[in-house]
Image (tube, helix red, strand yellow):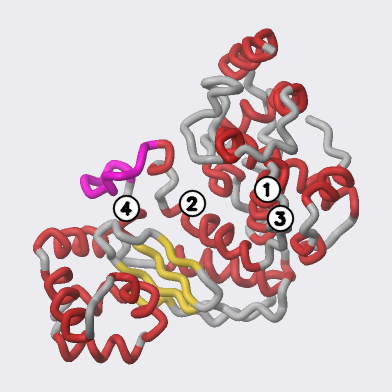
Amino acid sequence: MNDIKTVVIVLFITLIIAGCGRSGEECNLPEEYLDIPVDLEIVRMEELYFEGLTREKLLEYQDQYPEFSAAMFDNMGFADQDQMAEELIKIHQDSGMQELYREVKVHFDDLRSIESSLEDAFRGVKYHYPEFTIPKVYTFVSGFGSDLIVNEDIIVIGLDYFLPEDHPFQPVDLPYYILKRYNEAHLVPTIITALSSRFNHTDVQDRTLLAEMIFYGKAYHFTKTILPCTPDEYIIGYETEEITGSYANEELIWAHFIENELLYETNPFEIRRYTGEAPFTDVISPDAPGRIGRWMGWNIVDDYRINNDLNLQELMQQSDAREIFRKSGYKPR
């Protein structure tokens, strides 16, 4: 085991492969996606709450946008409507919040790029799931209180989280390896990955590492199918060198899982080592990216769908992780 670990460390440092697998290739969206009509309007709620907010306007917005109000404010513990109005006005008139809002306005003055990317994504979802209803999409500035809310009916984008990496306003409670994924390039893939959960059938009784790997693998496969032109880096949140290093060392990474009999591990602490947020997967190598089990699950799911000639709905409906693994015929590249 120590010999394999040493080899992995060396190879992660020294090996670069010429191709990036699914990343970095020329791509056009499928024509069948582009023919699907999508009616999307992004409502900029920050403009309503930060410019001349009064009690009367606030109560009007509560009535006009009930889904947004429920998503953003129902869990804030207000005793009644009077307290809610008083506190929300105080929050949105705060000088620091006003400055943050002005910075968001500068950097996100035009949302056409995000809107276009979301429209393409929703076209892809509707192609595979014709009954899919486009959720209402709102933007807001929460003072780094809420980055994304994604559910069946509503999406709320906390634009303050997606300011440029070098901007002086940054959330203070996030480590860099997570913070680096908060940018516009990762935004739509993150939304679609979150949205995939409603289609991702799972066996809740299966609490193995394999089940968690397959769950994430299906989520990333879903996102890649919906956004085929999006590089893997923006789907899983790895750097380019982490993608190429993982492909270069896939056989050795897989050997670690097999030799340590990890696939059917049920200890939550052990599972977290391979699928939880971390700067690296230290039990394999300090150069192995974190969440490497999710990446392995993605490869298994890719092989399962290809080798069994399934459409996306059929893949997402399969809840048996062991069956997916068994029929994937997975072998490291």
Q: Earlier in the sequence, mark 4 or mark 3?
A: 4
Q: Earlier in the sequence, mark 1 or mark 2?
A: 2
Amino acid tagged 1: Arg
In space, the residues marked 4 and 1 are separated at their CA atoms by 37 Å
Q: Nearer the viewer, mark 2 or mark 3?
A: 3
| Residue 24: % across, % down | 62, 41
In space, the residues marked 1 and 2 are separated at their CA atoms by 29 Å
| Residue 43: % across, % down | 38, 78
The residue that label 4 is drawn on is: 163
Image label count = 4
> What is the number of the mark on residue 186?
2
In space, the residues marked 4 and 2 are separated at their CA atoms by 12 Å
In space, the residues marked 2 and 3 are separated at their CA atoms by 32 Å
The residue that label 1 is drawn on is: 207
Amino acid tagged 2: His
Q: Secondary structure at mark 2?
A: helix
Picture residue at 51% right of the left edge, 29% below the top: 280
Q: Residues within 10 Å of mark 4 (few under 14, many from 20)?
A: many
Q: Residues within 10 Å of mark 1 (few under 14, many from 20)?
A: some
Q: Residues within 10 Å of mark 2 (few under 14, many from 20)?
A: some
In front: 173, or 36? 173
- Can residue 26 be seen from the camera position used here? no
Residue contact between numbered discs 3 and 1, judged by CB atoms under 8 Å: yes
Q: Seen from this angle, which residue lies furthest top?
A: 3
Stretch of the chain drawn in magenta: 165-176
Q: Secondary structure at mark 4?
A: loop
Q: Earlier in the sequence, mark 4 or mark 2?
A: 4
